[in-house]
Image: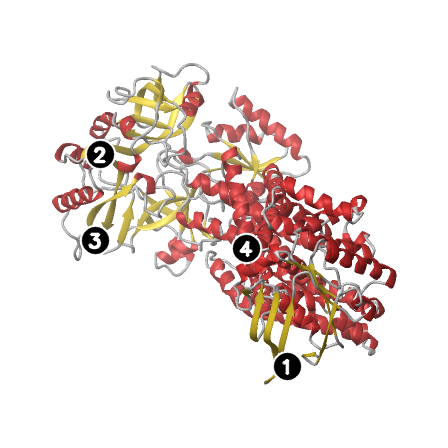
Amino acid sequence: MLLRYIQIAFRNLRRQRLFAFINIAGLALSMTVCLMVLKSTKKNFSYDKFHPAASRTWRITSQATTQEGKHYHMASAPLPLANVLRQDYAIAEEAVSLYGVLSGNVTAGKKKLPVSGAFTEPAFFRVFGFRLQSGNPATALSAPNSIVLSEATASRIFGTTSAMGKVVHFEKLGDYIVTGILAPPPGLSHIDYEAYASLSSVQALEQQGLLPERLLNWNNVQDGYVYVKLKPDVSEASLATALSFISRRYYQPASKGIGSITLEQQSLRSISPSREMYNDIGSAPPWGKVLGEIAVGLGLLVCACFNYINLSIVRSLQRAREVGVRKVNGAYRWQVFMQFIVESVIMCVLALLLALALLLLAEHYTSIGIGFLSGEPVDFMLIGWFLLFSVLTGVLAGVIPAWALSSFQPAKVLRNMVDIKLFGGLGLRKTLIVIQFSLSLTAIIFFVTVYRQFAYKAAFNMGFARENILNVPLADADFQLMKDRMMQVKGVEMITASSGTLGVPRHSGFMQIKTAVNGSHMQAGYYAGDADFLKVMQLKLLAGSGFPATMSRDHEQYVIVNEQMVKAMNLTSPSDAIGKAIWLSDSAMVSIIGVIKDFNYQPIEAPVFPMAIRFVPGQFTQLQVLVDTHDKEALTAGIKKAWLEMHPGETFSAEWMSDLMHEKTSGKEPVSGLAVLVFMITVIAALGLLGVVSYTTFTRRKEIGVRKVMGAGVSGLVLLLSRNYLRLILLAGLIALPLGYLGSLLFLQIFANRISIGFFTLAGSFVALLGIALLAIISQTWRAAQSNPVDVLRND
Amino acid sequence: MIELQKISKHYPVGFGKNEILKDVDLTIREGEFVSIMGPSGSGKSTLLHILGLLEEPSAGQYLFQGERVDKMNEKKRTQLHRGAIGFVFQAYHLIDELTVYENIETPLLYKNLSGSERKSKVADVLDRFNMVAKKDLFPNQLSGGQQQLVGIARAIVAEPRVILADEPTGNLHSDQAKVIMELFKQLNDQDKITIVQVTHSDLNATYGNRIIQIRDGYIQG
């Protein structure tokens, strides 16, 4: 029986090519996105599954209230807590602290590598499921200055030679002996440091002043993470009681002017996806993103299902007789129902196959743009999930049409086809079409705004030069020496040393400053640059001068500030600021030597804040080389040659500033990702409309014939047949225009410098959608209006 | 085997009602071949639909094989459709997506017969109607007469007690109609299947052994 259903389903698909194409294409498009979401979701929920007693392991978090009454939920906890839990409470089987400050550059031979690690205790290996590939877990983290490296980090530092017993030198935090190598963990974890050093090292570091005093400090909850593994049979409630008792013992309750901390437990299993806590660690995405992805996937899928429902119901006229015959031949309603469910499931499985192919394509060409969804590679388990998913989709999409079709009364459908009432009438179909087009138009408007904003951003004059400037890393060379050497390269016009590239996210430094008028500290951005910085970057000097050509390298004397800084100092004109003193964070006093015109030193999302250009050679990381344009290749080669003379054996990497700016600020990924989604949702809606118009026009062919015989013209008929659908599109416009406008407005709030949405964005988006809809409608109604009335009327 | 007592049928039309059948009393015994005749709109088809349990009467009693069926639920009605009643339609009503073989097999599928039983029954019927060569064709590849043969084959394959035929030759020319009517006669004589047909044709009516004239919802004399 099932076999027969499947067979007839395939025959139907073959006969109804338009119907099959619209449904399978729409479902496949949306399923592709759903599959990506499924993969990504599976990854998002696969964190921390390999710990031995995850159900009774908890992380202690802190609810902190500041003196000003502000409230923060922090994932971190005071470090002494672990000891208290271990010693004073019988409920804990193990407790372990993670102190995530072991970060900085590691030097190994001539190499200098950034490593981010944490200090922790031997209990680490008893609480969590991490295993050592070499070394003894019981002792590896006992002795001071021992360190366990992840496999990747070990090979990054030591290459192929064994790391065990070797010394790792942290620039600031001293030497550590490698006592263990972590085996690659069997799954993802929110704990993913590259190195773990023994917590017993910290005491000495604190005594030397290399680390702030935290081990016994209850009031600082910034950097420590405390986990407790409860004894079996100990309930969450007893942990909560213990924590509230500890909170009362070490902190006074919050009141005016007094900050406070309350400790709370969080199950290890609920850490990822993360809950938007401050100070959280790990790479797990927040719930918002996880749910957002799922919503996008399901939204698209529902749109595709709408098509299936609409088309199946419209098409049911063609299947009605079959239903009648089957019932007369002894079929129960549920049997007919099942037949149609099987058909829709088959349709969905076919769509799944197509979606899998699309998925592989999309993964092959990640440039298509949905790169923000990353997930695990496809395995059999996942394919099983996909299959289950597509069957569920089939049932979901098929229920309404199957219910409608199986409800036909044989006496009615076999006698007189004209009288059949379609399930849900026109209301249901119209609603579904309006929903689809509203979503589509909203998405189009949003997309146009995002696209325009990013285009605006790319073309925005940020107030500094970016063309023909090559960024060359200093890589520890002396900037002046390298500058002198590079100046000899033919085609180089000017060179400046700097701490980062203007306008690139996170390249700007931040500091606390104090001025004569601002008693308290205020925050300001800064870039370190040398005497040629203003010239190369073409920053406009309003008063004073740039840095003198020779300056003390060790003692900071002068600073150049922007207009905002002048304003923040309550000065009216730039020239008043010259010679005024500023105290920098390390209480060094410098005087203002020049004032420059405001420019966007940060990406244009942020408004221009007070900033300074400082001469700090120690912070220079790169040379920015302004060149003559003609022969960039020869020039780059010359610079490379000079660079390699100063850095024998290292790899040269330079980048054009304009390329870097474009890459970091164009928002290519969100824009193209959004473009794909908008394209999909519009295609699905247009296909659905095409199908519905095609079938309803088909059912009206007799009316068309009669009207033609009475003398109706083609244009009049097209108008008649199209009018109702145009009304639906207009209604969708009424719904979607405000929605899209609001959504765009919300998006634009991110940017300090933004476009206005404008009439043309809204009108243009609507006209574009209307055009697509008209194409779908008129292609069908035109054909119907052209038909020869005799063909239709003779058959009846 | 069929007993109608004071059967009426009316449809709501606007605020009033349109009476199709009025106080119909009718008894059909097992093995009869009955022809229902009457002008268009006289209620023939409605009467046949009521006999076939496709429509419920508005009033009156209907006994089928001694059992009250006029207020039967859908499940029990379907049981009768599976075993006791076969239909033949004027427009054949074959399923376009199924082959001749599959069309004939359909009622057996719903009777939950095993694969081999279905095979032998369908083969028997195909053999008897000389349609073995056409079993893999689709309905639109057959002539009208052949399609109606398939329709009859489908109606008898589940071995019903009664066949209800609604103008079975209405869409056929006279040669084909003759073949079909002789087939009915044969089924009635040899297989002892009760046959009730609705027809306009006096010639077709002569194949039966009783004629019921119906006019404006009343059975005439």
The answer for which chain carries disc 1 is B
Q: Nearer the viewer, residue B214 or A557?
A: B214
Q: Earlier in the sequence, mark 3 or mark 4?
A: 3
Residue A510, image x, y percentages? 37, 45
Q: Earlier in the sequence, mark 3 or mark 2?
A: 3
Q: Nearer the viewer, residue A418 or B161?
A: B161
The answer for which chain carries disc 2 is A
Q: Nearer the viewer, residue A305 or A15?
A: A15
Q: Say which element carries label 2.
A: loop
Residue A409 visible somewhere in the drawing: yes
Q: Say which element carries label 1.
A: strand
Q: Earlier in the sequence, mark 4 or mark 2?
A: 2
- Residue B18: assigned label: 1
Residues under labels 4 and 2: Cα distance? 51 Å
Residue with the mark numbered 2: A232
Residue A646, image x, y percentages? 52, 23
Residue with the mark numbered 3: A67
Q: Say which element carries label 3.
A: loop
Local crowd size for mark 4, using a 10 Å CA cut-off: few (<14), some (14–19), many (≥20) = few
Local crowd size for mark 2, using a 10 Å CA cut-off: few (<14), some (14–19), many (≥20) = few
Left or right for A20, reference A292: right
Q: Amino acid at mark 1?
A: Asn
Residue with the mark numbered 4: A334
Mark 4 vs mark 1: in front: 1
Q: Amino acid at mark 4?
A: Trp
Q: Amino acid at mark 3?
A: Gln
Residues under labels 1 and 3: Cα distance? 85 Å
Q: Are marks 4 and 2 on the same chain?
A: yes
